[in-house]
Amino acid sequence: QVRLVESGGGLVQPGGSLRLSCAASGSIRSINAMGWYRQAPGKQRELVAGITSGSSTNYADSVKGRFTISRDNAKNTVYLQMNSLKPEDTAVYYCNADLVHYSGTRYNSWGQGTQVTVSS
């Protein structure tokens, strides 16, 4: 059993900051890429940022220069630092991980999501 648990969402004013965390737990042999996605009401889920096992990163154009993704491999945790938040960043944010179970089975796992609301 593998779980991804997100934390750090909430309500913030425009221009503010939040830091999301996502911890993977269970019988994990290794974690390859990790990423953050978001889904706003009435819209499709979209990639916000991704990070490889070697810490190469990629970002959606809409968040470049404002968001930073990082990971702590010792803790099986990925972070998303979000600065200069805008109302259009409001969405449910989901963590995703491409990982390998101790059995050798490869999984693509999702967290349960955390709400981020940017509003005055």
Image (spheres, helix red, strand yellow):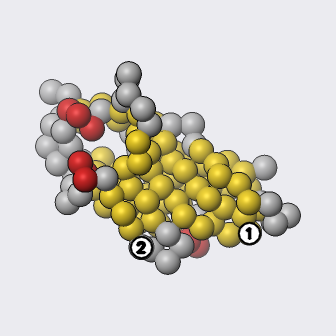
Q: Position of residue 58 (x, y in %)?
A: 36, 63
Residue 51: mark:
none
Q: Position of residue 9 (x, y in %)?
A: 39, 39
Q: Residue at label 1?
A: 29
Relative vertical location of residue 91 with respect to residue 52 in this rendering, above or below: above
Q: Residues within 10 Å of mark 1 (few under 14, many from 20)?
A: few
Q: Is residue 48 visible?
A: yes
Front residue (pair 70, 107): 107
Residue 56: mark:
2
2 or 1: tag closer to the N-terminus? 1
Relative vertical location of residue 48 with respect to residue 93 in this rendering, above or below: below
Q: Residue at x 25, y 53 (%)?
A: 61
Q: Position of residue 36 (x, y in %)?
A: 44, 50
Outermost right residue: 103
Q: Residues within 10 Å of mark 2 (few under 14, many from 20)?
A: few
Residue 104 in the figure: left or right of residue 7: right
**Front of the two marks 2 and 1:** 2
Mark 2: secondary structure: loop
Q: Residue at x 58, y 56 (%)?
A: 97
| Quarter that holds the C terminus | top left
Residue contact between numbered discs 2 and 1, judged by CB atoms under 8 Å: no
Residue 75 in the figure: left or right of residue 93: right
Q: Residue at x 74, y 69 (%)?
A: 29
